[in-house]
Image: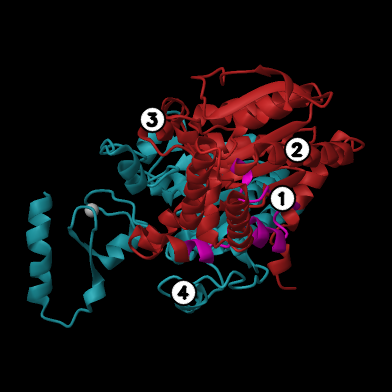
Chain colours: A red, B cyan
């Protein structure tokens, strides 16, 4: 069952009509409805093209959160060969909200980790809806250190509403765990490549996105706070989420303009979830190219480049 | 005793009959008792009745920390005030202008150099009264400047935190200050210099989840709220009330997240003691 977003209502109606005609076509062999179906299909595609060419920031948030959008587990299944999932922070627990492991990307041995939101209700609950607890960040830091020890490039996939806000997470040091993950990212001697695939929610996202190269999918978003959270703090209630989304300048296009990301990975027409093969291909090509570019750099240069990249960020807004 | 003071004090005021300005008396926002302003200042802005540690401005904080209340303020680089042209019910540029006029500075954060018990120390000090101490581009630049100043002066770095977190109105431009601040303190650590943190009320959000939680030694003031997510967000998300002793300096110490929780009057001494040992100096006579 395909999930339609509120602004996709005309498309939903077109698809329903197409489905109806298809059934009719099969039943009554006499009448040929192929032409009508083709016309409706063209109309649907035109709608998608026009709508997705000018999504508003809030609509992008909706697409980025689409339940059928590929998640870290999907990317790993599609792109990584011989994947060995690795678990646990060696301290307190295993946190399924961050998926980690080793594998091959087109013969390149890599370490891959990312937020996992889960596909169905059961998985979503198990993954805490992609909101990691301190043990998730400690596991990520452990994995990056491990990758560093064996000169494995690290690929991180970002897709979270944010770090888990809970009493136990606070007591186990959520703040320290995130700070430590940031510090680890900065000190790793191997290449880190990050892709913001869906939602880049605040500190819980950036904790694993301090990379040599940072990419965003065309309809992904990345910001300091969710539009709802921003609205409730600054406007006093969550109803101004659309205005907040515009103000937060959280789209890939905005962030590219500000030089906060390296590049945008194009999505198939109508979003990554509509043609997963295409997005897997685009993501893979981006990763391979980035790996190739970073391969000749020694560990010192890699660390330096990563640090300098973040030192340079926002420097364009410092006056001399 | 408290009820007696409560009764007696305003009476003195009435008897004296003179025109005493309203601000000579301050009501403690924790125990509601009246405190003489001069008494409060003498007590480092800690309530003499309930020991509630009131929030300090950055300059108040620095003057009680540095020897003879003297320190050199290192000027911050100027940053573009509102590149995102953020507007909620008010323009961010207007909010910022108001705060700047009130504080008579471009940002709340102060970078200072001076001696603490004869030890040269560089401090980056936040100010909650300036837009909630929020960390934006200017604060990020302040931390980098403090780091460079500490390294150039071969002096330890002391971060004094008082912040609700990242500055929302700068969105991603403020979020990236988290890694930038960590780079800054990493450089101090790599130079072999001590990095100490003083966590005051409040230290939360993107500030606690970056440089605030990475001190070689972390000192916190009693009762300070320290944590990542806000209490309201936690209660709304989990649909549960948070426990009484939650996200306080004391509970953080219990959970192993800070080294020392000590009364404001002991903070300076504790910092000096730790630094002397780290720097392999003899104890102060
Ligand atoms: Zn009191």
Give the structural element (helix, strand or loop) at label 4.
helix
Q: Residue at 44% across / 58% down in the picture?
A: A230
Which residue is more in the foreground, B111 or B255? B255
| Chain under numbered label 2 | A
Identify the residue position indicated by label 2 in the image.
A281
Q: Indicate which disc, 2 or 3, sits on the residue closer to the N terminus.
A: 3
Q: Is residue A111 left or right of residue B66?
A: right
Q: CA distance from mark 4 to mark 2?
A: 46 Å
Q: Quadrant of residue B10?
A: bottom left
| Chain under numbered label 1 | A
Q: Is residue B249 left or right of residue B146?
A: left
Instruction: Work out which residue is located at the far bottom of the displayed protein and give it.
Output: B19
Return the x and y of residue B182 as percentages of the image width and height: 64, 45
Identify the residue position indicated by label 1 in the image.
A266
Return the x and y of residue B65 as percentages of the image width and height: 50, 55
> Which label sits on residue B95?
4
| Chain under numbered label 3 | A
Q: Residue at 69% across / 41% down in the picture?
A: A279
Vertical order, B58 against B200 (above or below):
below
| Chain under numbered label 4 | B
Instruction: Sort mark 1 into few (<14), some (14-19) or many (20+) by Cα contacts within 10 Å.
Output: some
């Amino acid at each position: 069952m395909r999930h339609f977003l509120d602004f996709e209502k005309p498309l939903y109606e077109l698809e329903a009509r197409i489905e109806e005609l298809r059934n009719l076509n099969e039943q009554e062999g006499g009448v040929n409805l192929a032409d009508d179906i083709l016309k409706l299909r063209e109309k649907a595609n035109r709608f998608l093209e026009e709508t997705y060419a000018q999504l508003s920031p809030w609509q992008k948030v909706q697409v980025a959160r689409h339940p059928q959008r590929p998640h870290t587990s999907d990317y790993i299944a599609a792109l990584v060969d011989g994947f060995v999932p690795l678990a646990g922070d060696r301290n307190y627990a295993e946190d399924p909200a961050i998926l980690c492991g080793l594998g091959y990307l087109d013969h390149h041995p890599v370490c891959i980790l990312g937020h996992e939101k889960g596909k169905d209700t059961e998985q979503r609950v198990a993954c805490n809806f992609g909101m990691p607890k301190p043990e998730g960040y400690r596991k990520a830091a452990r994995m990056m250190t491990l990758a560093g020890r064996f000169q494995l490039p690290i690929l991180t996939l970002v897709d979270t509403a944010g770090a888990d806000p809970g009493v136990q997470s606070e007591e186990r040091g959520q703040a320290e765990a995130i700070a430590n993950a940031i510090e680890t990212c900065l000190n790793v001697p191997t290449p880190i490549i990050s892709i913001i695939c869906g939602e880049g929610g605040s500190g819980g996202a950036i904790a694993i996105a301090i990379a040599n190269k940072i990419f965003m999918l065309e309809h992904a978003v990345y910001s300091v706070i969710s539009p709802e959270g921003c609205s409730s703090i600054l406007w006093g209630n969550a109803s101004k989420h659309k205005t907040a989304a515009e103000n937060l300048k959280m789209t890939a296009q905005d962030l590219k303009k500000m030089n906060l990301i390296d590049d945008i990975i194009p999505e198939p027409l109508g979003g990554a979830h509509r043609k997963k093969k295409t997005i897997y291909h685009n993501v893979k090509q981006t990763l391979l190219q980035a790996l190739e570019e970073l391969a000749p750099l020694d560990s010192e240069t890699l660390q330096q480049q990563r640090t300098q990249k973040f030192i340079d960020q926002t420097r364009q807004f410092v006056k001399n | 005793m408290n009820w007696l003071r409560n009764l007696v004090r305003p009476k003195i005021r009435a008897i004296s009959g003179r025109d005493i300005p309203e601000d000579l008396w301050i009501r403690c926002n924790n125990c509601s008792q009246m405190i003489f302003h001069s008494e409060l200042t003498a007590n480092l802005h800690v309530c003499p009745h309930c020991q509630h540690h009131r929030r300090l401005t950055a300059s108040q904080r620095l003057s009680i920390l540095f020897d003879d209340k003297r320190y050199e303020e290192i000027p911050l680089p100027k940053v573009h005030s509102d590149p995102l042209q953020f507007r909620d019910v008010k323009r961010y540029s207007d909010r910022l202008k108001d705060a700047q006029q009130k504080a008579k500075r471009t940002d709340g954060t102060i970078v200072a150099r001076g001696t603490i018990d004869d030890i040269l120390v560089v401090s980056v000090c936040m100010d909650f009264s300036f837009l909630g101490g929020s960390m934006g581009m200017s604060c990020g630049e302040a931390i980098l400047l403090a780091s460079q100043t500490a390294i150039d002066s071969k002096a330890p770095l002391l971060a004094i935190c008082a912040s609700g977190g990242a500055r929302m109105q700068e969105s991603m431009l403020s979020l990236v200050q988290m890694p930038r601040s960590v780079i800054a303190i990493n450089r101090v650590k790599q130079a072999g210099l001590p990095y100490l943190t003083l966590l005051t009320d409040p230290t939360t959000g993107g500030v606690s989840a970056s440089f605030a939680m990475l001190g070689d030694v972390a000192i916190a003031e009693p009762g300070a709220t320290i944590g990542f997510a806000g209490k309201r967000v936690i209660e709304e998300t989990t649909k549960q009330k948070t426990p009484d002793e939650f996200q306080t300096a004391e509970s953080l110490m219990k959970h192993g997240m800070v080294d020392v929780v000590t009364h404001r009057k002991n903070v300076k001494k504790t910092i000096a003691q730790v630094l002397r040992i780290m720097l392999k100096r003899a104890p102060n006579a």
